[in-house]
């Protein structure tokens, strides 16, 4: 009987090509891949969040990333959009903030994982600011473990010196906590792409040729933006795609972020 051809799944403006598993015998080790979505969600008091959060759930349920990183999360009381999303997807959620629990509004980022979390942590980058807390999760991958770090390297005030200071703090924390495991950095980077690579040696952006963004006023933004950085000695990039919802009625298209798929390289020898 002839096997059916792979199908194309069109859902919520996302054109996805499923990966077909082959049953051919092979002596090679199976390829180990990790998918990471880096997002910025509408604020929970934004009408776009209320109107489209169920579509966001459906889009991410279709993609099923292993890890979701959410930037610029604001929490009032015990609720925030990122952990609400994690609850709907049945993911683990870490809200990463430098604000004390007694503060009415807390700002930070979030790491969501559908893989078991072996270890997590948080640190503060300098100069400190509203979103200067960085976090990490250690997750099982293949026969080993991998560290996923999240950071928003947009210092307040912004300057080359402050950007480098935050990058140095992050790299020092990774060196102190990686324990020899392969590491990734998911986040939002205000520096240009060349500065990002220079400031975090050994890490490669998933977007090899990130384009300059243009805002509604027509001014360009040369910042690197949302991305996943991976250690080139441990990973290779497979693909990256945008995550966005199409326009619907009076609601404009909503760009959420990017999905990167990387592959763990086999250890030398």
Image (tube, rainbow, N blue to C red):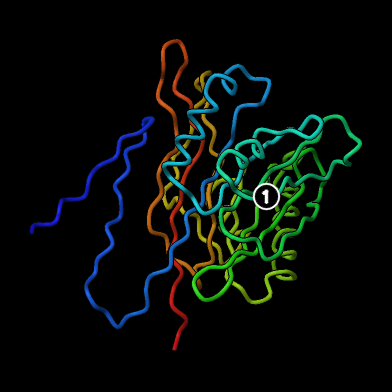
Give the residue drawn at x 30%, y 55%. Answer: 19
Q: Where is residue 244 shown, x and y percent of the image?
A: 44, 32
In the picture as drawn, the residue positioned furthest to the top comes out as 250
* 168, 85: nearer the viewer: 85
Give the residue drawn at x 47%, y 60%. Answer: 34
Q: Where is residue 246 shown, x and y percent of the image?
A: 40, 25
In the picture as drawn, the residue positioned furthest to the front comes out as 1
- The residue where tag 1 is placed is 151
* 127, 102: nearer the viewer: 102
In the picture as drawn, the residue positioned furthest to the right comes out as 102
Q: Where is residue 15 shown, x and y percent of the image?
A: 32, 38
Q: Classify the position of the N terminus by image quarter.
A: bottom left
Give the residue drawn at x 61%, y 42%. Answer: 86
Kindly indicate the quadrant of the structure image that contains residue 199.
bottom right
**Label 1 element class:** strand
Q: Is residue 116 above or below residue 18?
A: below
Q: Is residue 230 above or below residue 49?
A: below
* 156, 226: nearer the viewer: 226
Left of 190 or right of it: where is 129? right
Left of 59 or right of it: where is 45? right
Give the residue drawn at x 29%, y 39%. Answer: 9
Q: Where is residue 200 shown, x and y percent of the image?
A: 62, 60
Q: Residues within 10 Å of mark 1 (few under 14, many from 20)?
A: many
Q: Classify the position of the C terminus by image quarter.
A: bottom left
């Amino acid at each position: 009987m002839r096997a059916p051809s792979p199908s194309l799944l069109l859902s919520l403006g996302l054109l996805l090509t499923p990966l077909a598993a082959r049953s051919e015998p092979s002596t090679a080790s199976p390829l180990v891949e990790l998918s990471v979505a880096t997002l910025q969600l509408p604020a929970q008091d934004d009408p776009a969040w209320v109107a489209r959060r169920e579509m966001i759930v459906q889009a991410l349920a279709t993609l099923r990333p292993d890890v979701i990183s959410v930037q610029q999360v604001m929490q009032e009381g015990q609720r925030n959009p990122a952990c609400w999303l994690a609850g709907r997807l049945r993911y683990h959620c870490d809200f990463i903030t430098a604000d004390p629990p007694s503060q009415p509004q807390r700002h930070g980022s979030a790491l969501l994982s559908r893989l078991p979390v072996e270890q997590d942590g948080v640190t503060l980058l300098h100069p400190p600011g509203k979103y200067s807390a960085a976090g990490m999760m250690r997750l099982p991958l293949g026969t080993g473990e991998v560290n996923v770090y999240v950071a928003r390297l947009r210092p307040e005030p912004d300057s080359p010196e402050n950007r480098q200071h935050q990058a140095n703090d992050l790299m020092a924390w990774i060196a102190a906590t990686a324990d020899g495991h392969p590491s990734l950095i998911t986040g939002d980077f205000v520096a240009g792409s060349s500065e990002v690579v220079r400031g975090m040696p050994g890490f490669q952006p998933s977007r090899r040729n990130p384009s300059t963004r243009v805002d509604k006023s027509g001014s360009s933004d040369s910042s690197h933006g949302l991305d996943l950085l991976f250690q080139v000695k441990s990973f290779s990039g497979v693909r990256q795609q945008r995550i966005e919802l199409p326009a619907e009625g009076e609601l404009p298209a909503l760009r959420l972020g990017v999905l990167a798929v990387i592959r763990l390289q086999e250890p030398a020898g």
